[in-house]
Amino acid sequence: MSRPTPAAVAAELAPSSAEPLRLQILTALALHRTATSQLRQMLRPEGSRQLISRALHQQRTAGYVDLTPLHATDRSRTHAWYLTPEGARQTRDHPLLRGRPPCPITTSTAASLKTPHTLTVVRAHLAFAADARRLGHEHGPFDWTREVAHLIGEGERLVADAVCTTPSQAANTAGNCGAFMEIDRTTMSSERLAIKLIDYARLFTYDTQPAGRRKPHTTGPGWQRWYPVFPRVLFILTGATPARLNNRISDLQAMTTQQPLVAALARETPLAAAVLEDLEKHGPSGAVWTLLTGGEPRSWTEL
């Protein structure tokens, strides 16, 4: 198979309403880092498994993607796909990826270390995408961006697991642009998870100061450079018994009511949590979200 030249790839990466499947695969892996057969659900939900498999193996032959084996509980053969450094270079000029540093995975071992969390984040995205298709809302495979970093002061950064764009038909507030997503597999302590709320509260108030200025020069919080309104902060939990997950949600609620900065944030934007398996079963539009300020479970559109 002949290898496409960089010039040919760059030309194909120009904006298009119907990009070739191979370029959609490269873009999806650049945005989501790693994916399994989830790529079919993401890019061609009505297509055949062979269609995606053939395109992936073509890209592997070209040197743009590679795979790492997964240990499935049913002993079936499963692989996770990721971009190679060459694949990352080919996508760096894509409009969706401009300004984002390339994050290629250089070895199968490195891929396997990142895979469990990354694939869980993709699962959450697919729940939103499937719900949007069912409701006829606009929410595509690229309306979910992984690992979005924000400055929060004192040389520190907050890296959201994902930023999700709200389908316009589902937004209940003018200008509501979506949500910060935190995906918890119960691999960290409940206290450490709840502390993330403080980081989001710091982001809400953080005012970037131009270099060299001695006097305060406030043009508004730094997040306003990127979002018309502050996105909702949503926690998606999995990896434990229902009782343990409910306890973690209770800890998040306690942080919201007891920590002054977080309480102030909760007065300005919704903070909520849901269980991933409930999202997959009922969809984000089901009554699966628990507000961290209390109240009955509600749907994504009621947050």
Image (spheres, rainbow, N blue to C red):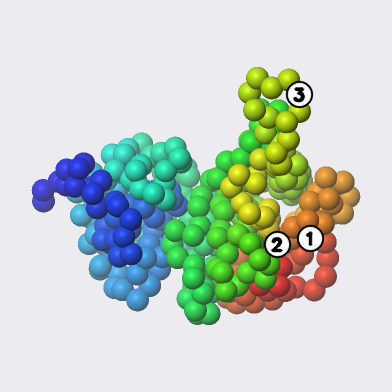
In the image: residue 135, left or right of residue 174? left
Residue at the image point whose x is 76% and y is 28% from the top: 216
- Write down the residue under mark 3: 215
Q: Which residue is mark 1?
A: 292
Position of residue 265 in the picture relative to residue 60 (left or right)? right
| Mark 2 touches mark 1? (CB < 8 Å) | yes
Answer with mark 2 or mark 3, whichever residue precedes in sequence. Answer: 3
Q: CA distance from mark 1 to mark 3?
A: 38 Å
Q: Label 1's element?
A: loop
Q: Residues within 10 Å of mark 1 (few under 14, many from 20)?
A: many
Q: Is residue 264 above or below residue 38?
A: above
Q: CA distance from mark 2 to mark 1?
A: 7 Å
Identify which residue is drawn at 63% across, 69% down: 171
Mark 2 surroundings within 10 Å by alpha-carbon count, few (fewer than 14), some (14 through 19), many (20 or more): many
Q: Which residue is mark 2?
A: 273
Question: What secondary structure is marked by label 3?
Answer: loop
The front one of 220 and 118 is: 220
Across and down, in percent, residue 192 comes to 72, 43
* Viewer-proximal residue among 85 and 303: 303
Foreground disc of the pair 1, 3: 3
Looking at numbered disc 1 in the image, what kind of residue is underneath it? Leu
On-image quarter of the C terminus: bottom right
> Could you tell me which residue is drawn at 55 percent across and 68 percent down?
167
